[in-house]
Image (cartoon, rainbow, N blue to C red):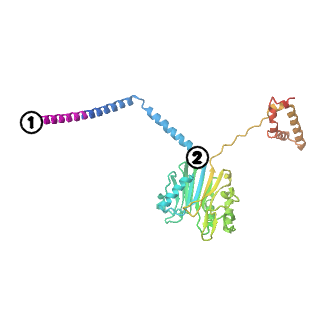
Amino acid sequence: MKCLNLQDHQAKTHNYRKGLAYLKNRATTSQNQILHLQKMKKKYTQADNNRRPSNQKKKKKGRMENHRINWNTRFKMAINNHLSIITLNINGLNAPIKRHRVAEWIKRQKPSICCLQETHLRTKDTYRLKVKGWGKIFHANRHDRKAGVAILISDKIDFKTKDIKKDKEGHYLMIKGSIQGEDVTIINIYAPNIQAPRYIHQILTDIKGEIDENTIIVGDLNTPLTPMDRSSRQKTNKATEMLKETIEKLDLIDIFRTLHPKKSEYTFFSNAYGTFSRIDHILGHKANLNKFRSMEIISSIFSDHNAMKLEINHGKRKEKKPTTWRLNNMLLKNQWVKEEIKKEIKTTLKKIIMKTQPLKIYGLLRNQCSEGNLEQYRPFSKKEDPKLTT
């Protein structure tokens, strides 16, 4: 019995090993078949692609790329019709946490152009200021951690840089460029605390040749321009009055005071004097007054200054073509209207002094019988008005 059991066990073991070998061979065969099929599929796919027109895929890809480009262009064109400029004395950007908070604040405000003062960044540290969506950043810095100004341009506007001017002390930065084909000049100024009006007066005098209708001047000027810009209502001194004269000669205006002549809002609180003042300003050209939509002061918790934000209607407006006024002939079919027109002509002739030029008389009569004066007779132009039948 023991011998039979041993033989049975050996037979089962042999069959088991044989079965394992069979399964392994089968698995290897399956893998080889899969690899073979993949090679054949790749081969026939390449042959099929070679039979297709070579430019078919490229054309489709090109159409998609062109569509994407056209869409981006249209999107930028729509954005460019409305610009926003924001300015803030940031009071230092060397702390990483503060840089992060400022970046998040800029993203929430979504300005087209953001101007910062007192960045306190050294020339070699300007790379630390990064804001996603504002790829173009211009700096004016010193070699130490004082002063410093920066201008950030949003990626949503097609800004093309033409010229850059700045001082070595990090107090002002001017960039000239174009947005949607229209020239624009942005000047960012941080005036020192001592003799600020004289400093700004000197800067404006030096760069007056660069200032035109498309110029916007922003920054911490450290100067209240009117008594309303101080909570104490203190009168302005001679240096400030001289600065205001310079601003007027350059045809510039204080946009906030122009839009809000009686509003008292401030951007800075002085702990030393216990007073509020508006020493941050945005100046623009008189010719663009109709483009300035709105302006507001925005509070900030990470700086001792408040921000100012200006909304601008940007882009050249299409002028309406002059139209020629024509008399509605339906009015002349009514006898009463005709009599009224005759009365108007007689009344006008009585008011006219003798003229030697008949064309002038005709012009006066034509103006009297213009669209505005005949507007009251417009309901009489209807054919089926029972009150007007004669």
> Would you say 42 lies left or right of 136 here?
left
- Disc 2 versus disc 1: distance between alpha carbons? 96 Å
Where 287 falls versus 356 (above or below)?
below
Front one among 265 and 61: 265
> Amino acid under label 1?
Cys
SS for dot 2: helix
Q: Which residue sits furthest bottom?
A: 272
Residue 15 in the magenta stretch? The answer is yes
Which segment is the magenta one?
A: 1-27
> Amino acid under label 2?
Ile
Q: Kindly check if marks 2 and 1 are in contact, taking CB atoms under 8 A apart as contact.
A: no
Residue 72 visible to an observer of this rendering: yes
Q: Which mark is residue 3?
A: 1
Residue 210 visible to an observer of this rendering: no
x and y percentages locating residue 125 in the rendered image? 47, 61
x and y percentages locating residue 344 in the rendered image? 87, 39
SS for dot 1: helix
Q: Which residue is mark 2?
A: 79
